[in-house]
Image: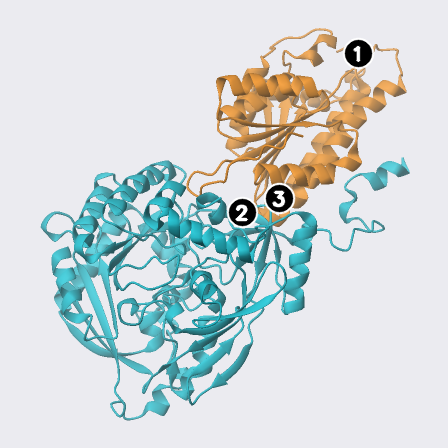
Amino acid sequence: MQTESIPPSRPLEPTPAAIVIGASSGTGAALVRRLAAQGYAVAAVARREEELERLRDEICRSLPQAHVLVVPHDVRDYEAVPALFEEITRKLGGLDLVIYSAAVQPPVNVHEYNFEKDQSMIETNILGAIAWLNQAAMRFERARRGQIVGISSIAGDRGRVGSPVYNTSKAALDTYLEALRNRLSRYGVTVTTIKLGFVDTELLKNAAKTFWVISPEEAAARILAAARQRKQVVYTPRRWQLVSLVVRTIPSPIFRYLNF
Amino acid sequence: MSELKYAVGTKNTAGDSPRANELSSEHLEWVPAWGNATGSVAYVYRPTTLEGIQDVLTLARENGRSIGLRGGGNSYGDAATNAENIVLDLRRMNRILDWQPETGRIQVEPGVTLAELWQYILEDGWWPPVATGTSMTTMGGCAAMNVHGKNAAQVGPIGEHIIEFDLLLASGEIITCSREENSDIFHAAIGGFGMLGIFTSLTMQMKRVYSGLLNVETETRRNLADMFSYFYENVAQSNYIVGWIDSLSAGSSLGRGDVHKANYLAPGEDPNPTQTLRLDNQHLGPNLFGVMPRSIMWMFMRPMNTNPGMKLINQGKYIAGRFSGAKRYQQPHVQFHFLLDYIPDFKRAYGPGGLIQYQPFIPKETAQDAFSEILALCQKRGLPNYLTVLKRHRPDDFLMSYAVDGFSMAMDFRVSDSNRHRIAWLMKELDEIVLEAGGRFYFAKDSTLRPEVANAYLGEDRINRFKALKQRCDPEELFQTDLWRRVFA
């Protein structure tokens, strides 16, 4: 982690601080760019250090005042999280927002039962989220303020033939975020679940057929707008909410004959 | 899988044995500025003993964190907050160590509040020489900020009534300081906003009073010039004097308002001093106007907290004062002094964004013009202050002194997300006016001071002397606050 620290905050013009986990590419990288442009000090957490450094350099070229902290970390290294979290909040000089955006989705065909692939999705998509967001929740509960955003997916709404464990990991994330929201709202902490549709990222290249695809930049803009409005569950773009309603209402005896 | 069970979020699970001197996230708290416009998260410790304080010093050192000292938490800005580091809250160090009712000398721990102090000494016929507008301040905090009361021009700040103190340095060593012993540290730690060390005991001289009442006189003044002339005529003949300005009036009545002055009763003037000095004679009363419980008053003030609402209130107050004319009455000490306690949580009337205060101290030669300019500029920018208080001051010999032979004007500004940048900009404009007029600033009230402004009014020499003393008392810079880093680091 780089050692440069954020300049002292001024009471009337505070520098808000955010952590984005899964920041090296796709939606996560777009979130870091957008937060930096909004004046946030951002800790960008991801496995690929060079990608993060490239992102930071790119941001600092256009925004010389930006503060982007590069934090190389594999979200499966759960034990490292508490100490890392403490170090980041200290370097940022505070913490207002945590966004968990890390996810993997290896290609899986409909006859494949590959435990290694399944394990990687559970570890990155849900266990990593729990390791990081537990820390955030603990801190925000004590501070009586703060905001948690989990980037989930419409994929969590039903178990489908094409991606059993990816669906499972996102469903688990939805439930975990809901529980955090119920725990923390009484302390003034907001937990926002983002149900993303298709976003034009590396994750998408394994998808069979796609539509209504939005750019990572648009996704980031919509996510931060939802966060600013302190929303609870937001489908992005909105029309997915309707789709989800239909998909969730299809009775199981019919759903099992469908191939999507 | 059992490995994972213990791996996730291990810090606070049972079976994990943390180092004895590890910072515990159990101590994390949001530490607000009094004005609620800012605040930060810190590890808060509240020891009750010297050993407890020493443990926190060790803890800080072993974890590479700084320590911000905090008393009652009544500083308007970031003087007692310390983001992501340790806040040492000294309120539980609140014993009265020695009291001599014959001479009025008292020795207290730093966490003793002004309320605890006056309640302890009043029935013996004594009153604190300097009283802040709230009685929730602690003596350690008062000394660190070198606070003043409505008698600043007559008796100076509280530092002038401190005889000696013990200061715990970052090394753990305790030194005694007075005007004779360690006099340089004495004059720098008082008003040194907690940067040199921790006051562990303070010996102070109280003021003899012969009644629990004060003779109070109030009247209205038509504009700022009229207000100033009242101060010039009355400061020498009164024990306390304070002005309230209707900051939303403009033109020929710019700076109009009420003035209050008060005098102690002479020996024998109170026919029954033992009765008026009793604690139960000193109360604020449960209700305002006879019916409104004081504790919920802020809820009714909140909707009025807008430019038109406050214009109405300020005008109403002035006109009511105008109609009733000059008044003389007797009032218990607490009612005269602790206006801020009169409406509990009145800061909540300012809404979720809170408030900041801006209080410049300006020499008497330039004060009237500068204050006129300031009041007019705030109105022009559409950011009038809602509560404005005028006081007279005299210079003192403390290193980081804010005092001048002149006047101070304390102004409360409501902060919201939509106006905070405009306020910050306005404060920069006001800083120019104050510096031009030879003015100074006060750390207890400050939220906006910039390093270059501090350099300009304190002078590099004074700052270097202070930093040299800090180097001597605290070479590792163990004692820090958000204010220290904002203005001096």
Report if the CB atoms under discs 2 and 1 are less than 8 Å apart.
no
Q: Are marks 2 and 1 on the same chain?
A: no
Q: Quadrant of the N terminus of chain B?
A: top right
Query: Which quadrant of the view contains residue A256?
Result: top right
**What letter labels the chain drawn in orange?**
A
Position in image of residue A68 (x %, y %): 58, 27
Q: Residues within 10 Å of mark 2 (few under 14, many from 20)?
A: many
Viewer-side label of 2, 1: 2
**Element type where label 2 sits in the image:** strand
Viewer-side label of 3, 2: 2
Inspect this view and state whether residue A27 appears.
no
Image: B432 above or below A35: below
Position in image of residue B382 (x %, y %): 25, 40
Image: B208 above or below A63: below
Residue on which disc 2 sits: B40
Image point (50%, 52%), residue name:
B32
Residue on which disc 1 sits: A107
Q: How far apart are marks 1 and 3 (CA)?
A: 37 Å
**What letter labels the chain drawn in cyan?**
B
Query: Which residue sits furthest top?
Result: A209
Image point (35%, 43%), residue name:
B453
Position in image of residue A221 (x %, y %): 53, 21
**Amino acid identity at mark 1:** Pro
Q: Which chain carries label 3?
A: A
Residue on which disc 3 sits: A140
